[in-house]
Image (tube, rainbow, N blue to C red):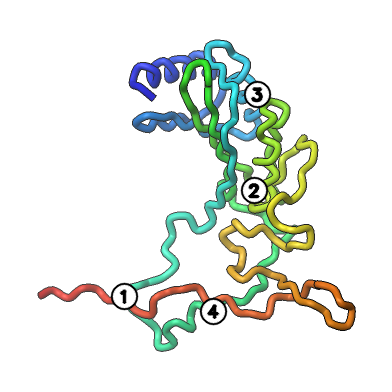
């Protein structure tokens, strides 16, 4: 986006969204608006239907899991005697229906395009500590949100209130958990096998152990 269009969009955001509590993040050639989830539908409607803005297209929607964001998992300057075996994890992580999530663990990112004005904007909202993580659906504003929201539901377990057909879209119907969550075990929770007696494919708890590829030792470089 050119500097002129960037400045125009900045001015219009100040004019039309001044009544909302928004954190505006300016990048070199783009703008991100972090907004409250209760304002999501109203702001999206305004961005689409206001002629001066005319964000007629939702080009992408995705979930983000910020669990352990910015935290290093391993101290790489020293190692334990057990080395690689310290990375073994048990596959017992299944979503807890009673868990209360961190306020800013799950986010939804929306990428909008104004075809007429030839400019783009990014929206970001957090689901809060509700379980399951939930926001309002924007399928009533942009029809393209339908499959995007189903994908975010499938992979992150984020619910979209008002979605006309919220069900899994990438994993199968017997799948347990949401594979893009940071606490989802690498080997999953279930595996399929063929039951020779019943002559059909069935599920059972996964039998392999997850061993993340973590180096045994990374030493600090000695001064020469």
Q: Which residue is mark 4?
A: 88
Which one is nearer the viewer's eye here, 149 or 85?
149
The image quadrant of residue 146 is top right
Residue at 74%, 62% (x, y): give it. Answer: 175
Nearer the camera: disc 1 or disc 3: 1
Q: Are marks 1 and 3 in contact (CB under 8 Å)?
A: no
Say if mark 1 contacts mark 4, CB within 8 Å: no
Secondary structure beneath dot 3 equals helix
Q: Which residue is mark 2?
A: 129
Label 1 – label 3 distance at C-alpha: 51 Å
Of residues 82 and 60, the one drawn nearer to the viewer in this rendering = 60
Disc 3 from disc 2: Cα separation:
22 Å
User: Most extreme residue toward the top, as rendered?
Assistant: 51
Please state, as top left, top right, bottom left or bottom right, where the C terminus lies in the image. bottom left
| First along the sequence among labels 1 and 3 | 3
Q: Label 1 crowding class (10 Å Cα cut-off): few <14, some 14-19, many 20+?
A: few
Q: Assess whether mark 2 and mark 4 are in contact (beta carbons under 8 angstroms).
A: no
Q: Nearer the viewer, mark 4 or mark 2?
A: 4
Distance between the Cα atoms at labels 4 and 2? 29 Å
Is disc 3 surrounded by few (<14), some (14 to 19) or many (20+) residues within 10 Å? few
Q: Residues within 10 Å of mark 2 (few under 14, many from 20)?
A: some
Q: Earlier in the sequence, mark 3 or mark 4?
A: 3
- Say left or right for 52 vs 142: left
- Judging by the rendered image, the residue that carries numbered circle 1 is 218
Q: Nearer the viewer, mark 3 or mark 4?
A: 4
């Amino acid at each position: 986006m050119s500097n002129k269009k960037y400045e125009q969009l900045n001015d219009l955001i100040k004019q039309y969204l001044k009544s909302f509590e928004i954190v505006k993040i300016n990048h070199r050639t783009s703008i991100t608006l972090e907004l409250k989830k209760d304002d999501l539908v109203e702001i999206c409607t305004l961005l689409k239907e206001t002629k001066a803005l005319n964000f007629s297209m939702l080009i992408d929607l995705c979930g983000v899991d910020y669990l352990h964001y910015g935290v290093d998992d391993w101290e790489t300057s020293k190692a334990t005697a057990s080395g690689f075996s310290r990375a073994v994890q048990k596959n017992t992580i299944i979503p807890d229906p009673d868990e209360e999530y961190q306020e800013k663990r799950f986010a939804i990112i929306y990428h909008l395009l104004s075809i007429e004005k030839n400019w783009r904007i990014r929206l970001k909202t957090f689901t809060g500590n509700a379980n399951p993580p939930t926001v309002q659906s924007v399928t009533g504003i942009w029809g393209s949100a339908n499959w995007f929201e189903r994908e975010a539901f499938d992979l992150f377990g984020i619910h979209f209130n008002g979605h006309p057909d919220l069900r899994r879209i990438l994993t199968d119907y017997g799948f347990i958990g949401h594979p893009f969550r940071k606490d989802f075990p690498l080997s999953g929770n279930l595996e399929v096998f063929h039951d020779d007696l019943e002559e059909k494919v069935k599920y059972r708890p996964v039998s392999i152990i997850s061993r993340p590829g973590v180096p045994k030792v990374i030493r600090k470089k000695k001064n020469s």
